[in-house]
Image (spheres, rainbow, N blue to C red):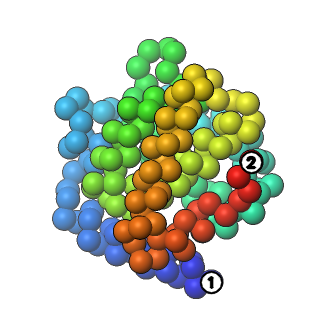
């Protein structure tokens, strides 16, 4: 219960301190090309929802699966969908890094939550055999997410607690 209260307070503080001070769409301000919302990525995520939910509830995560899915939908709304070969099951490391950096710069809390959610989603793709990208891309995306999480844990006084809330599950 204490963690939920702290999480809500953190979310409110992040929104107060960051969203109000940095107006506009977080994804439009940082990219030289304007990212248009991608309904295709969200539809692709929605087709994976049932399998993801089944996978998720079998593990001892403490964050509600609906919160994770909402965070993923926010991220994938602005993850570029260019061409028919692009899929959320084969993430591009450069695009992941760019979109997360933009989100973190403009709305810190949502950016950090998206990072933890993407880490969980990436693990799901790997465990379920749904990762369709190259192994090098998987390792690169995983490394980017791990680096951001490590920075969050070092910079925030409650970082370790945040990490435990978002990632409490067996590694394999």
Residue 87 in the image: x percent, y percent? 54, 25
Q: Residue furthest top?
A: 84
Residue 21 in the image: x percent, y percent? 19, 65
Residue positioned 41% across, 67% down in the render: 154
Which of these two is toward me, 36 or 156? 156
**Quarter occupied by residue 82:** top left
Inter-mark Cα distance, 1 to 2: 27 Å
Q: Is residue 134 left or right of residue 111?
A: right
Mark 1 neighbour class, 10 Å CA radius: few under 14, some 14 to 19, many 20 or more: few
Which of these two is toward me, 93 or 107? 93
Q: Which mark is residue 172?
A: 2
Instruction: In the rendered view, tell whether residue 80 sits above or below residue 158.
Output: above
Residue positioned 49% across, 21% down in the render: 86
Callout 2: SS: loop
Query: How many numbered badges does the structure rendering display?
Result: 2
Q: Is residue 81 left or right of residue 171?
A: left
Sequence-wise, the earlier of marks 1 and 2 is 1
Q: Is residue 12 left or right of residue 133?
A: left
Q: Is residue 61 left or right of residue 2?
A: right
Instruction: In the rendered view, tell whether residue 46 sits above or below residue 131.
Output: below
Instruction: In the rendered view, tell whether residue 142 sits above or below residue 11.
Output: above
Q: Residue furthest right?
A: 58
Residue 23 in the image: x percent, y percent? 20, 56
Callout 1: SS: loop
Question: Which residue position is annotated with label 1?
Answer: 1
Q: Marks 2 and 1: in contact by CB < 8 Å?
A: no
């Amino acid at each position: 219960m204490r963690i939920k209260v702290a999480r809500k307070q953190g979310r409110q503080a992040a929104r107060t301190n960051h969203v109000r001070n940095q107006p506009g769409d977080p994804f439009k301000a940082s990219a030289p090309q304007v990212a248009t919302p991608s309904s295709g990525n969200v539809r692709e995520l929605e087709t994976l929802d049932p399998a993801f939910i089944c996978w998720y509830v079998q593990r001892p995560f403490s964050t509600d699966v609906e919160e994770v899915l909402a965070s993923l939908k926010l991220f994938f709304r602005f993850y570029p969908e260019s061409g028919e070969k692009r899929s959320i099951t084969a993430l591009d490391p450069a695009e992941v890094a760019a979109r997360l950096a933009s989100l973190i710069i403009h709305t810190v809390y949502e950016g950090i939550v998206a990072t933890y959610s993407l880490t969980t989603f990436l693990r799901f793709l790997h465990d379920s055999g749904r990762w369709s990208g190259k192994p090098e891309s998987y390792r690169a995306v995983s490394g980017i997410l791990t680096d951001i999480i490590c920075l969050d844990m070092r910079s925030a006084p409650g970082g370790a607690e945040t990490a435990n809330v978002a990632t409490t599950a067996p590694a394999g």
